[in-house]
Amino acid sequence: MLSSNLGYPRIGEKREWKKVLEQFWAGKLEKEDFLKQMEQIRLQHLQKQKDAGIDLIPVGDFSQYDHVLDTAVMFGLVPKRFDYKGGKVSIETYFEIARGTKNSVAAEMTKWFNTNYHYIVPELGETLPTLVENRPLQFYREAKQKLGIEGKPVILGPVTFVKLSKGYHNANSVIRQFVTLYTQMLSELQEEGVKWVQIDEPILATSLSKQELGLFADVYQQLHEAAPKVNILLQTYFDSLDDYEQIVSLPVQGIGLDFVHDRGENLVSLKKFGFPKDKVLAAGVLDGRNIWRANLDEKLSLLTDISEIVSRDRLIVQPSSSLLHVPVTVKNEDALEDVLKNALAFADEKLHEVVALTQGLRQGKEFIQEEVDASKIVIQLLNESTFRNNQQVQKDIQNLASVRAEREVPFHIRQSLQETAFQLPLLPTTTIGSFPQTQEVRKQRQLWRKGELSDAEYEDYINAEIKKWIDIQEELGLDVFVHGEFERTDMVEYFGEKLAGFQFTKYGWVQSYGSRCVKPPLIYGDVSFQDPMTVKETIFAQSLTTKPVKGMLTGPITILNWSFVRDDIPRDVVANQIALALRKEVELLEENGIGMIQVDEPALREGLPLKRENWDHYLNAAVYAFKLATTSVRNETQIHTHMCYANFEDIIDAIHALDADVISIETSRSHGELLSAFEENTYDKGIGLGVYDIHSPRVPSLEELTKNVERALQVLDPKLFWINPDCGLKTRGLEETVAALEVMVKAAKHEREKLVVKK
């Protein structure tokens, strides 16, 4: 029996990886030093896993930006708009694909299945793929030569890679084209003496057709024949397998299954159909996506059940997925109360849990009895704490049937009232919410948090920033303003700090995209409203202008999906607790004269289950929570929402059902492809399709933005169309933000004049 890990967080205990990246991008670090420091971080991560006692240590899971992008450049897949002459892709070109250049837009970015991690979408069809470098082999050699580790190379599988790409017409023919390159890669690994290779095919946890399953059989037969001495561990995660019998029969030496996020279905299939006696089962029994300590007694019982079907010498114990999705270690969280801290397990602690469970199976439960008992005690103490037993919150949840969760009148009536109230021009312009958070803004916040700046001094500073950007918006000629969110560290963290039931860590960072790291709050208790959260800043901003200023809130589903959520009650219940708390804030904004309120749900799509049969329950619950938060307002009050980076055609009905007066969504980075969803589905409410990509430092041209607007107006009603960037501007610099918004306002005025002439 072996212990294994699927992947380790890249960012380091204190985000060392992020700092090195951003120093290199800023020109403060030479390429040689950058690569050297990245290697040091990578080796430290491997050494940690070795010291923890993990038998099968992943190599090649480390990335300098994104593992899907790594796979693309390994095959020389560089879009033609970038200057690439063939051969190994330079680190400069690698980052240009991810971040864009002055003249070339970045590759599209979207969510990795139903997580908050974003990957760079490979573009196929422009370049003939070739194996320009065998990255798994390089990382295997590095680990063996420098640390004496017999690593397990991790490779994104050919079917998943192509399915996550764009620019092809026939997936089967393209996949077969890539199989040749994968066979070359595996042959070289076999020649090197590699024993185990982990090939990730998370697409297997989605709903597949018989044709797609047949393709898997052909693909893996070819891979097996190309490298028969390499043990292939076909790894799945994030859900159960619909076609269990066919998948476990594939010509590989091991199958990795998720026994955490499968709702018990993988275990049912295992008991019903058995498991091939010539294969190893890698049992993902520890949650790779959440931070709660495992009840080791329950996990041992699960593994014991599994071992009744799969002999223990053919078992691998591991997390349910890569630990990329959790922070690095709990050890530095000195400020947390013991009742909470003792119930947490980040990546390093999960490695120790994996090893403990492996030892418990090898040598008997009594060998790890102390760890088993400790895990049960700390979980019980948290469940019995006052944090999880707020009687008022639980009473409010029980009485939800008496709370109105619909607007009083339909949209077309509200629209007329809101047009009279706001008197906005055709194609009104606005932004999504945040403006640049400069180094000085962050410095002042740190001084305030340390007590070196008084509350009054900090408030004066924030008010000065708000006034500066209200003035800038006036000068730019925007139609609807925002206050800029300078008081907020993060769109979820800020609200978590204000609501009961949330806790924050000091170093609990996870990677969202590129060097962008977020620190998800821990929802560890019953959630309730305490004090006004956004009213003061929004009222101040509105006092500075006659233009409408939007109140800015984060929606209940995004707060849920971007947090580490308690696992002792259903997620729907937690979402409704959050919604009731936000409802009170919405009502306070309205009472204080704020007539536009934006409740953002950028993470609504990402929480969609991988199995279509589970979509309705999730979407119905998400729509209900959003309405619970937003529908108590007057008809004249305009509710906005925002979503980004998703396949919106999957949730177009849910978007309708939200009944928001205006929705703004990303379209720039997908190069207008999102519009196809609106060509096939009529949308009859206000909508803004983000006309330029805020994740790139480039300033778009007037021609580019005009083209984006005109393309949208081919399928959307100009009377309902808004013009805005595709996301918040927090990460951008002042000069590029102002320059881009100037172009955006010019494009809006240009199109507005054309529409007036047409009339």
Image (cartoon, rainbow, N blue to C red):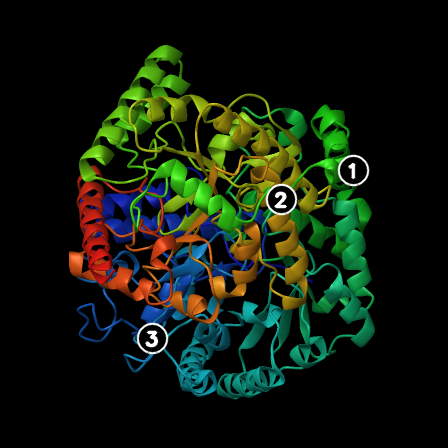
Distance, label 2 to label 3, CA atoms, is: 51 Å
Classed neighbour count for the residue bearing mark 1: other residues with Cα under 10 Å, few (<14), some (14–19), many (≥20): few
Q: Position of residue 567 (x, y in %)?
A: 69, 43
Question: In the rendered structure, are the residues bearing label 2 and label 3 in contact, judged by CB atoms less than 8 Å apart?
Answer: no
Q: Which residue is mark 2?
A: 406
Helix, strand or loop at mark 1: helix
Q: Earlier in the sequence, mark 3 or mark 1?
A: 3
Mark 3–mark 1 Cα distance, whole angstroms, equals 49 Å
Which of the labelled discs sits on residue 248, or is there none?
none
**Mark 3 belongs to which amino acid?**
Phe
Disc nearest the viewer among 2 and 3: 2
Question: Measured along the vertical axis of the image, is residue 182 above or below residue 344?
Answer: below
- Residue placed at 17% from the left, 56% from the top? 702
567 to the left or right of 40: right
Q: Is residue 164 left or right of residue 373?
A: left
How far apart are the two marked residues, 2 and 1, measured between alpha carbons?
48 Å
- Of pointers 2 and 3, the one earlier in the residue sequence: 3
Q: Quadrant of residue 280?
A: bottom right
Name the front one of labels 3 and 1: 3
Relative depth, front residue between 163 and 613? 613
Q: Which residue is mark 3?
A: 75
Would you say 613 lies left or right of 93 here? Answer: right
Q: Residue at x 61, y 81 (%)?
A: 209
Numbered disc 3: secondary structure: loop
Residue 121 spot, x, y in % from top left: 38, 66
Quadrant where the C terminus sits is bottom left
Look at mark 1 in the image and give the residue it sits on: 373
What amino acid does circle 1 point to?
Answer: Asp
Residue at (36%, 23%) from the top-left corner? 446
